[in-house]
Amino acid sequence: MPDQDDKDPNMETKSLTSSESQRENVLYIHKIGVPPKQNVLKEFKSTLKETFFSDDPLRPFKHQTKSKKFVLGLQALFPILDWGRSYNIKKFRGDLISGLTIASLCIPQDIGYSKLANLSPQYGLYSSFVPPLIYAFMGSSRDIAIGPVAVVSLLMGTLLRQEFDPENQPNEYLRLVFTATFFAGITQATLGVLRLGFLIDFLSHAAVVGFMGGAAITIALQQLKGFLGIPSEHFTKETDIISVMKSVFGSIHHSWNWQTIVIASSFLAFLLLTKYIGKKNKKLFWVPAIAPLISVILSTFFVYITHANKEGVAIVGHIDKRINPPSLDKIYFSGENLLKGFKIGIVAGMIALTEAVAIGRTFASMKDYQVDGNKEMVALGTMNIIGSMTSCYVATGSFSRSAVNYMAGCQTAVSNIVMSIVVLLTVKFLTPLFEYTPNAILSSIIISAVIGLIDYDAAILIWKIDKLDFVACMGAFLGVVFKSVEIGLLIAVIISFAKILLQVTRPRTAILGKIPMTSVYRNIGQYPEAIKVPGVLIVRVDSAIYFSNSNYTKERVLRWLTEEEDNLKANYEPRIQFLIVEMSPVTDIDTSGIHAFEELHRSLQKRDVQLVLANPGQLVLDKLYAAGFPELIGENKIFLTVADAVHTCAPKIAHDVLNNRDSTPVLFVPTWITMCIHTNGDLKNILKHILLRKEKAKMKKRMKEKVKYEKEKGKKREELHRKKKKQMKSEIKQKQNKAKAEKKKQKKNKNKCFNL
């Protein structure tokens, strides 16, 4: 590479091969790798594979016999056939204990959750019998406990009530429940089969936290009807907090039942106490797990012996003893109700799926094993499809039950089978015992269960990390609490999408500078010690460049250039000659993005600034070469690193920088001279620039000294004032004490005179 003094500034940089042979002891520059031309079909297959089959699910089937492939296929569909071969009595012991424990928790919860969905109690129990059995054979999570959950029950109850009144149209309502459950299963299974599980990630964690918190408060508010003993006809059908509070306080004089309130309050206090005990001592995890069942037994016995139901305490009543009657003939497969069920099913299915996958991944990470998201979707979808045909409504993973299952020492999904058998026996033989169970105790159980859905710590963490995420969280929360569950969900989805759009359409950009004593270039905002290279502006784009952000990216880069040029003019510094775009964070680019770069190149040419690219990825480079962009700017303007680009574009400056002459601003004088020569400046201008710079530095120094002197003078003045003030206070206090002593003395003398 020729020396910069012998080179015309308007000439393009010579080839790297010749330059390397002419310079010694200089940074070695690696030529950028030009990607080979790819076959269009092969490129499409590669993209498709990476998008939908990134985990390579067919890898175990390679180089296998047909019989082995058949066995592997069955094991992929039914994981129990795989881990079942190593199952033993020790694992069964753990599964038996955990299965019995979660059964004691799920039975009272199921009866309560069915009421949230406006269904008879037996449908909650049915949904904890068939779906867990199906999941045990098809699911890949060892810890998840399947059954009805509060949020999905409330969501279905709210959406279904808008179509049919469960009290006046019970048959139509029940048929729509099974139809919605069927389509929820179809939605879940389809997403799994088509490997579209990534769609659930569009609902951000922050939005889910807000939605769950809002749903928890809404569920708790709905339980005030049973908690206070308010009859259904006096309680609002709306779910927002304002309507519920109006309904509650409007019926305070004629509908509240004090016996119901005493029962509900007493057992709620008991349940919260057991939760506290379990939280404080992890070994006592079983205490909060069996507390709901104990509460049901005690409250039922109390109501039975005291005949409290005759005093206005509402009870569960008769529960059907039949075991999951078939319901395929009740599903709507035509007419307008089919569309209604389809819409409700999609919403309920997506929420159920989000909750189940999140729970499965959480516990899998705790035990260090992998959960296949797509297999989970197929398993959840299949169990809900079969469930809809056996009188069940939407079931999914329950966080409270899964936590108890994990703490109880479950080893495999057999714990779900144990729970199903216990529920089956309960439905067949024990349902008459629940006839006198007060609704108040079910309200207390649900309130104690949903308290855990309000995650204060997560909300605080979201606020600290990302304010926009917090807006999504609070938007979902307030939407659910003050309007309805579906509005809250809609707000959560809209804000999540808005955030994605904002991040895509407004990518971050940064000015880079060189870290002293290294060849590393970093954001000068993050590293204030980073030094800009004179005559060179280095900009990093932190996003893929698409049609949605290409114009903004171009304008932002030009704005950086304008701002930098204005600063240089104000400080009498040399102009920008090279604009280097750091491309390593740019993962992809489309035709609009390339067109924006072409426009940027034309704009820079008018300003006599050369465009240089550093470290573009293979995919980006492929597209740039396909569009002929390297020929437009020159192939020698694309480099492997920013350091290579700086070294080649400004050899003299780079030589000074690489030899660590940039540790102090004073040592940039040779660079000033070089840059002035590059801009055809004469000796008079050079000296003028140097003198102005020195004069400016002196003035800055004088100003700093003056400010320092004024500060010290002010401090001394303040100190003197403080001392005077203290002295005055001391003198006033002495005078006051003297006056007090004088008064005391006079009083004493008066008393003496009086005695005499």
Image (spheres, rainbow, N blue to C red):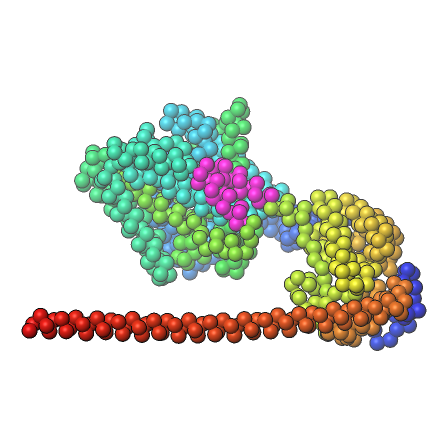
Q: In this view, does 457 lie to the left or right of 740?
A: right
Whether 244 is drawn above or below 21: the answer is: above
Residue 477 part of the magenta-drawn span: yes
Question: Which residue is rendered at x = 76% and y = 49% of the image?
Answer: 554
Question: Which quadrant of the figure has residue 120?
Answer: top left
Whether 131 is drawn above or below 732: the answer is: above
Quadrant showing the N terminus: bottom right
Task: Pick out the residue farthest to the top.
Answer: 335
The front one of 115 and 39 is 115
Question: Which residue is rendered at x = 34% and y = 54% of the image?
Answer: 275
The front one of 647 and 419 is 647
Question: Which residue is rendered at x = 51% and y = 30% of the image?
Answer: 341
Magenta part, dominant SS: helix
Quadrant showing the C terminus: bottom left
Residue 393 part of the magenta-drawn span: no
Question: Which residue is rendered at x = 70% and y = 67% of the image?
Answer: 530
Q: Percent from the top left, x then y, of residue 318? A: 29, 34
Q: How many marks?
A: 0
Residue 381 is at least partly visible in this image = no
The front one of 705 and 442 is 705
Question: Which quadrant of the figure has residue 569?
Answer: bottom right
Residue 344 is at least partly visible in this image = yes
Q: Percent from the top left, x then y, of residue 755? A: 7, 72
Q: Percent from the top left, x then y, of residue 388? A: 47, 35
Q: Is residue 664 left or right of residue 360?
A: right
Span shown in magenta: 469-498
Whether 738 is drawn above or below 307: the answer is: below
Q: Percent from the top left, x then y, of residue 736? A: 29, 71
